[in-house]
Image (cartoon, grey):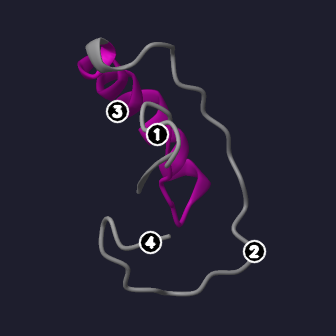
Amino acid sequence: MLLFETTNPNRGVGLSFWKRQEDAERYHREVFPRLVESLRHFIEAAPTVRSFNLEAAETFRISAGKAA
């Protein structure tokens, strides 16, 4: 999921959700570096990665550009 600021569309956040910590760690170790490298010419600074535990969630069907 990619989110971009409304006042500064050059600044954004990417979210990914994993069922298992091991899957997230493998993605971060094996896939994320290649993804960052392929996007290097689009980004100004190296992205940072932070982990969070999901405590509660609701399912919504929101189209791109419809959220406010």
Q: What element carries label 4?
A: loop
Q: Neighbour class for label 2 at 10 Å: few (<14), some, many (≥20)?
A: few
Measure how far apart labels 3 and 1 are at the Cα level. Answer: 8 Å
In the image, which disc is placed on residue 67? Answer: 4
Which of marks 1 and 4 precedes in the sequence?
1
Instruction: Specify the farthest residue to the front.
Output: 7
Tag 3–tag 1 contact (CB < 8 Å): yes
Tag 3–tag 2 contact (CB < 8 Å): no
Q: What element carries label 1?
A: helix
Q: What element carries label 3?
A: helix
Residue carrying label 2: 55
Which of marks 4 and 2 precedes in the sequence?
2
Measure how far apart labels 3 and 2 are at the Cα level. Answer: 26 Å
Q: Does the magenta stretch include residue 16?
A: yes
Q: Which of marks 2 and 4 is in front?
A: 4
Q: Residue at point 51% right, 60% down?
A: 18
The magenta segment = 12-40
Measure how far apart labels 4 and 3 are at the Cα level. Answer: 29 Å
> In the rendered view, would you say 16 is above or below 14?
below
